[in-house]
Image (tube, rainbow, N blue to C red):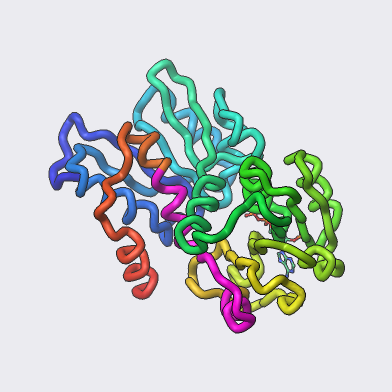
Amino acid sequence: MTGVITGATLVAGVVGAPVRHSLSPLIHNAWIAAAGLDAVYVPFSPPAGGFARFVDGLRGGAIRGLNVTLPFKGDALDAADKPNARASIAGAANLLLFEADGSVRADNTDGEGLLAAFKEQAPGFDPGRAPVVILGAGGAARGAAAAFVAAGAPEVRLVNRTLGKAEAVAAGVGGAAQAFSLTSVRDAFNGAGAVINATSVGLDDDAILDLPLEVLPSGAVAMDMVYAPLVTGFLAAARLRGLATVDGLAMLVGQARPSFAALFGQPPPEHVDVRGLALAALGNQ
Ligand code: ATR
């Protein structure tokens, strides 16, 4: 926002529950200010069970669009009339765009953000070179699997405590996806080029996954989608093992960039240190 909200101010935002810790308003408003746009990006938190009604109330262009975070990414896909291919394959949407004719488009920029995070923090990593391991089989894991299949991974190995869920995700994303139970994680790690933690372990508690990191090739990259803390137990253990690491904040900024471009019709300004802003905010939480 340029400081004054006018009748012409474009409104966009993020919807989640809870949404108060979302860093997206900080990131997008910093870009909006730097680009000099007459726009504002605000948080929304509809009541449980009220997501579809919330979206219906915005149809017709009351706002330009919304990023979507937990727990609504699946609901967002269901609420949209026009999901694009990558949202449909991921089974989730993190971006809804409201058209003037009342229709709602859905996109998913999380996979693009994940690959951008690897490019930024592990530039030597080539997704097409070796199998990629994804820990978990929820929506985040499915999106990651779809992104790596699309990026040409020779094999995507989904490792999950509940094998059936990993099998369902593997079948859904197609490509060379294989399911492993957590008890077979050693087999999944064998020869892997990257391991991505897409489980919710440690999100709400201090639980850690006990992983045989010594099995991984020394050139493997470890990535955690969690960004608070920035260095999770998994990433700390990977660094001790000598592996390159990629953090969840790089993915958050990586998905925000194409989201901003879709919402405001221009790429975000390059010169804004949104990662620094986000880190400062995380330190203050
Ligand atoms: P999202 O949709 O955000 O990815 P989710 O659907 O709640 O989240 O998925 C959480 C993932 O973390 C699941 O893969 C879950 O494993 P199960 O499918 O077996 O439930 C995994 N997970 C959560 N707690 C775990 C734990 N303590 N150990 C191992 N895996 C765990």
Position in image of residue 271 (x %, y %): 25, 54
Displayed quadrant of residue 86: top right
Displayed quadrant of residue 260: top left
Residue farthest along the bottom direction in this orientation: 240
**Residue at 48% from the left image edge and 33% from the top image edge:** 55
Position in image of residue 173 (x %, y %): 73, 40
Give yes or no for residue 50 being in the magenta stretch: no
Q: Is residue 153 left or right of residue 278?
A: right
Residue 153 visible within the image: yes
Q: Nearer the viewer, residue 177 or 172?
A: 177
Image quadrant occupied by the N terminus: top left
Q: Quadrant of ligand 1?
A: bottom right
Q: Nearer the viewer, residue 72 or 232?
A: 232
Image quadrant occupied by the C terminus: bottom left
**Residue at 82% from the left image edge and 70% from the top image edge:** 186
Position of residue 131 relative to residue 146, above or below, is below
**Residue at 25% from the left image edge and 45% from the top image edge:** 32
Q: Which range of residues does the magenta coloring cover?
A: 235-257
**Predominant SS of the magenta segment:** helix
Position of residue 252 relative to residue 98, above or below, is below
Give yes or no for residue 245 being in the magenta stretch: yes
**Residue at 58% from the left image edge and 74% from the top image edge:** 235
Residue farthest along the top direction in this orientation: 101
Position in image of residue 208 (x %, y %): 67, 77
Q: Is residue 129 left or right of residue 278?
A: right
